[in-house]
């Protein structure tokens, strides 16, 4: 549900939304170009100069801003441009020294209910550059500042153009784990192949852990494994981090779609992390508590939460030791404990 507001300035809310971009579209701020309230949020000493200098501003815009003039209104979404526009309106406000006027935003919304809100370039020329320029000029004119032809306004227009282009690129590259999932499936297929060919050579875990003392071909295979291992880990760390920022409903949708792939990744790749952990003599052991990555813990937590309560096949699944991606860590700890026990017995 969209939240309609005047100007929300709670830092905690701003921070939460900045970390969760999908929430951005749920907030619509309606602002009059004559409303002095914005001067509380933006210091008037910041001004508006040729380089548009701006002191650190506590207020961080988020969501969509419907900025209204006496005759029209426009929508803006890019946060930095919203701040710049609010400063321009501050400097142009005829009511700046008339105290705090009370604006009836209900009347403003009613006045524009049946009007077309200027937001873009859908009816303009097909040329991209002209579209971009017009798509900036029309909204500026709608809020009463587009007619200014000063060097300051030219600077602002150019700055907004660059931000719009950067925003297009950002949206095109927005978080979508599906875009790279097929590439990650190729990396997983390579690990599956490696696991199969090492079955009769000591097994997947030992072949990876001790490949440094083997043939050149085996060393080369390990290098390929490390490359795919790193790519997979980077992908899933990023994915888990982004999913944790999603609203609960979207996070649940992710689990349904991606959790199976994430579980397969964890079971296939975590043993390699365990092998590398115990290969390093400086580690103190206890991988599960001291060395395990948080993204593995989160993937396992989601898998457990997703499992139906009272599932009848849990016991059957537990028979396969590889179901537990930490199995080899327990083996390593058992070896360490046995070694310590033998050393203790020999000293006696």
Image: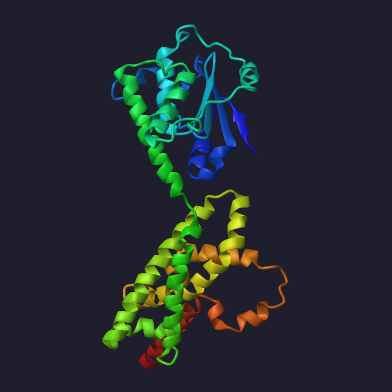
Q: Is residue 68 left or right of residue 140?
A: right
Which residue occupies the extreme front position in the image?
126
Q: Quadrant of residue 316?
A: bottom right
What's the colour scheme?
Answer: rainbow
Location of the N terminus by quadrant is top right
Q: Is residue 251 visible?
A: yes
- Figure check: 97 above or below 294: above
Q: Residue placed at 54% from the left, 76% from the top?
A: 324
Front residue of 8/220: it is: 220
Q: Residue placed at 36% from the left, 81% from the top?
A: 209
Q: Residue placed at 37% from the left, 15% from the top?
A: 148
Front residue of 29/205: it is: 29
- Figure check: 24 above or below 289: above
Residue 152 appears at what percent x and percent y? 32, 20
Q: Residue placed at 40% from the left, 25% from the top?
A: 84
Please give the count of numbered marks on the rendered protein: 0
């Amino acid at each position: 549900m969209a939240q309609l507001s005047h100007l929300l300035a709670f830092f905690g809310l701003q921070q939460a939304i900045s970390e969760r971009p999908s929430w951005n579209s749920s907030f619509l701020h309606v602002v009059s170009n004559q409303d002095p309230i914005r001067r509380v949020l933006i210091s008037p000493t910041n001004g508006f100069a040729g380089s548009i200098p701006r002191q650190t501003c506590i207020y961080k815009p988020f969501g969509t801003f419907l900025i209204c003039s006496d005759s029209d209104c426009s929508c803006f979404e890019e946060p930095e441009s919203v701040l710049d526009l609010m400063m321009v309106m501050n400097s142009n406000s005829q009511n700046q020294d008339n105290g705090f006027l009370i604006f009836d935003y209900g009347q403003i919304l009613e006045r524009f209910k049946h009007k077309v809100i200027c937001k873009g370039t859908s009816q303009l020329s097909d040329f991209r550059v002209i579209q971009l320029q017009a798509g900036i000029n029309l909204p500026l004119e709608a809020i009463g500042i587009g007619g200014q032809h000063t060097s300051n306004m030219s600077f602002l227009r150019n700055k907004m153009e660059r931000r719009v282009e950067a925003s297009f690129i950002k949206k095109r590259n927005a978080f979508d784990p599906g875009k790279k999932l097929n590439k990650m499936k190729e990396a997983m297929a390579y690990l599956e192949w490696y696991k199969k060919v090492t079955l009769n050579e000591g097994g997947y875990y030992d072949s990876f852990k001790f490949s440094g003392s083997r043939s050149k071909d085996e060393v080369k295979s390990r290098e390929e494994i490390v490359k795919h291992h790193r790519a997979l880990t980077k992908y899933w760390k990023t994915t888990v981090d982004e999913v944790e920022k999603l609203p609960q409903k979207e996070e649940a949708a992710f689990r349904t779609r991606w959790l199976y792939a994430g579980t397969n990744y964890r079971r296939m790749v975590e043993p390699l992390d365990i092998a590398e952990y115990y290969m390093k003599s400086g580690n103190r052991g206890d991988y599960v508590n001291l060395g395990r990555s948080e993204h593995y813990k989160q993937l396992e937590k989601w898998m457990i939460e997703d499992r139906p309560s009272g599932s009848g096949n849990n016991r059957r699944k537990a028979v396969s030791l590889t179901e537990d991606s930490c199995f080899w860590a327990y083996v390593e700890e058992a070896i360490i404990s046995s070694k310590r026990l033998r050393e203790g017995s020999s000293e006696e």
